[in-house]
């Protein structure tokens, strides 16, 4: 039976490869960190992980995960509501809610699940979801699973958002949905203006803080802190897989009744396993570390500023980043791929993005900075950028 289908897949895969879109994996044999070791023993400096606060190999998180296994075991073998809730799951939910100044929180196996399970339980065909055009794939999929009417506004374009809010005025409820930081440009959603429009047009507000939590805002508490819009955002989703330790796990935090309803009706919560004790315990430890001190966030911001300033001095065209994502603009798709592979030869891992991931003619190298980077790492990366930039005629 497989024969014809196999041939079909082989042809599709060939087409992906010919288009230069075939994704290969790098095989790492060390912990995730600023400096990583590959399977062949070579080393590289990593500028393409979401390890913003450098917590992915933090000794306190490793110890917390190890210790809890002695008292709470390895796995839960249950969904939360049947028999999969331990004291530490509730403790982590409380820590998430406290961090974001929200009333309650609910954990998921991933933020992909948090976004997949947030719309359908809350909204029906009478309602409207108004979504930024650059929102993450998991938001797009979550919206698809819900019967609400869909409106899409151009990225961070407040005129367009206002127009869509007007169109949606006859709906029962409206919700504006945005990423906190958009992962291609590193720009932050204009939350002050979004919240103003939400109150003018009677809409709820939801933010996905996956790339912004731990990063933006005076002490890294996310977009609410950056724009001082506490009390005006109704739902926040986020991941434990980026700044907050980098393992797995996601959450939705927000108003009490919203979280209550998700516990009753959210399908990825009801029909998927509880996160394991080690993830819950390391998550609790993550928020302890962040409550004790802002040092990691301070170091991250110093690294971002240092890298951006040196790169601009060197003559690179840098998007005005407001996050830990720095887009080095090259505009040409093949050039972005050659540039990234030459950087890898220099021992620096960065990612080249081009259409359709970014708009046509907007190819770039995306650099992700981390509190794990030391000055010497940044200097090596900048030197490699200048060398490759000269070789490829990007720097004049
Ligand atoms: C990474 C990311 C997710 C997915 O998070 P996981 O916990 O890895 O599933 C969701 N939304 C945004 C905006 C992200 O950047």
Image: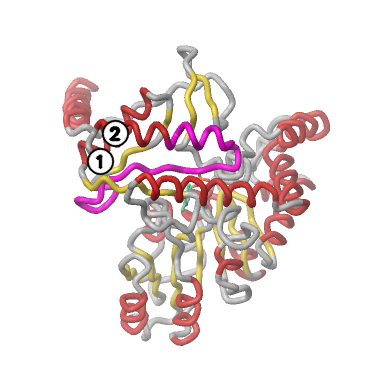
On the question of residue 109 being in view, the answer is: no
> Foreground: 126 or 280?
280
Give the residue at x 22% y 37%. Answer: 393
Against 258, residue 271 (above or below) is above
Give the residue at x 22% y 23%. Answer: 6
Give the residue at x 25% y 51%. Answer: 362
> Foreground: 350 or 94?
350
Looking at the rendered structure, which numbered label has been put on residue 339? 2
Q: Quadrant of residue 73?
A: top right
Colouring used for the render? secondary structure
The stretch drawn in magenta includes residue 367: yes
Secondary element at image label 1: loop
Which percent across, then down, holds residue 156? Answer: 37, 68
Q: Is residue 152 left or right of residue 272?
A: left
The stretch drawn in magenta includes residue 266: no
Secondary element at image label 2: helix
On the question of residue 390 being in view, the answer is: yes
Looking at the rendered structure, which numbered label has been put on residue 394? 1
Q: Magenta region: which residues?
A: 356-382
Q: Quadrant of the N terminus?
A: top left
Give the residue at x 40% y 58%. Answer: 320
Q: Count the marks: how many?
A: 2
Mark 1 crowd level (few <14, some 14–19, many ≥20, 10 Å Cα): some
Which percent across, then down, holds residue 40? Answer: 45, 12
- Name the outermost residue toward the top: 40
Which percent across, then down, holds residue 150? Answer: 34, 69
Q: CA distance from mark 2 to mark 1?
A: 10 Å
Q: Is residue 194 left or right of residue 106?
A: left
Against 153, residue 18 (above or below) is above
Which percent across, then down, holds residue 252? Answer: 59, 58
> Foreground: 217 or 69?
217
Asked if labels 1 and 2 touch by Cβ distance under 8 angstroms, the answer is yes
């Amino acid at each position: 039976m497989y024969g014809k289908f196999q041939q079909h897949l082989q042809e599709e895969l060939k087409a992906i490869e010919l288009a230069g879109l075939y994704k290969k994996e790098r095989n790492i044999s060390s912990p995730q960190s600023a400096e990583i070791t590959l399977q062949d023993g070579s080393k590289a400096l990593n500028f393409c992980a979401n390890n913003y606060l450098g917590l992915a190999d933090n000794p306190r998180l490793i110890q917390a995960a190890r210790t809890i296994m002695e008292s709470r075991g390895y796995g839960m073998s249950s969904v939360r509501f049947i028999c999969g809730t331990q004291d530490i799951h509730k403790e982590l939910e409380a820590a998430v809610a406290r961090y974001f100044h929200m009333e309650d929180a609910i954990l998921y196996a991933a933020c992909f699940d948090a976004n997949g399970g947030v719309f359908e339980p809350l909204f029906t065909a009478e309602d409207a979801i108004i979504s930024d055009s650059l929102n993450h794939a998991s938001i797009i999929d979550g919206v698809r699973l819900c019967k609400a009417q869909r409106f899409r506004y151009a990225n961070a374009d407040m005129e367009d958002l206002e127009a869509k809010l007007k169109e949606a005025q006859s709906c029962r409820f409206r919700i504006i949905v945005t990423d906190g930081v958009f992962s291609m440009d590193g720009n932050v959603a204009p939350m002050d203006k979004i919240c103003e429009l939400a109150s003018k047009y009677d809409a709820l507000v939801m933010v996905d803080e996956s790339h912004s939590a731990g990063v933006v805002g005076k002490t890294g508490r996310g977009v609410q802190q950056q724009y001082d819009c506490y009390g005006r955002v109704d739902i926040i989703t986020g991941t434990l897989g980026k700044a907050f330790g980098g393992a797995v796990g996601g959450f939705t935090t927000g108003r009490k009744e919203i979280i209550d309803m998700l516990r009753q009706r959210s399908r990825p919560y009801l029909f998927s396993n509880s996160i394991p004790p080690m993830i819950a315990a390391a998550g609790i430890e993550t928020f302890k570390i962040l409550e004790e001190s802002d040092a990691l966030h301070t170091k991250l911001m110093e690294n971002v500023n240092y890298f951006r300033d040196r790169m601009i001095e060197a003559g690179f065209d840098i998007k005005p980043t407001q996050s830990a994502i720095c887009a080095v603009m090259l505009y040409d798709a093949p050039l972005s791929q050659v540039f990234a592979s030459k950087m890898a030869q220099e021992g620096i891992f960065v990612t080249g993005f081009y259409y359709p991931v970014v708009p046509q003619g907007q190819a770039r190298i995306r650099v992700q900075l981390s509190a794990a980077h030391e000055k010497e790492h940044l200097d090596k990366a900048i030197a490699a950028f200048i060398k490759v930039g000269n070789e490829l005629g990007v720097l004049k």
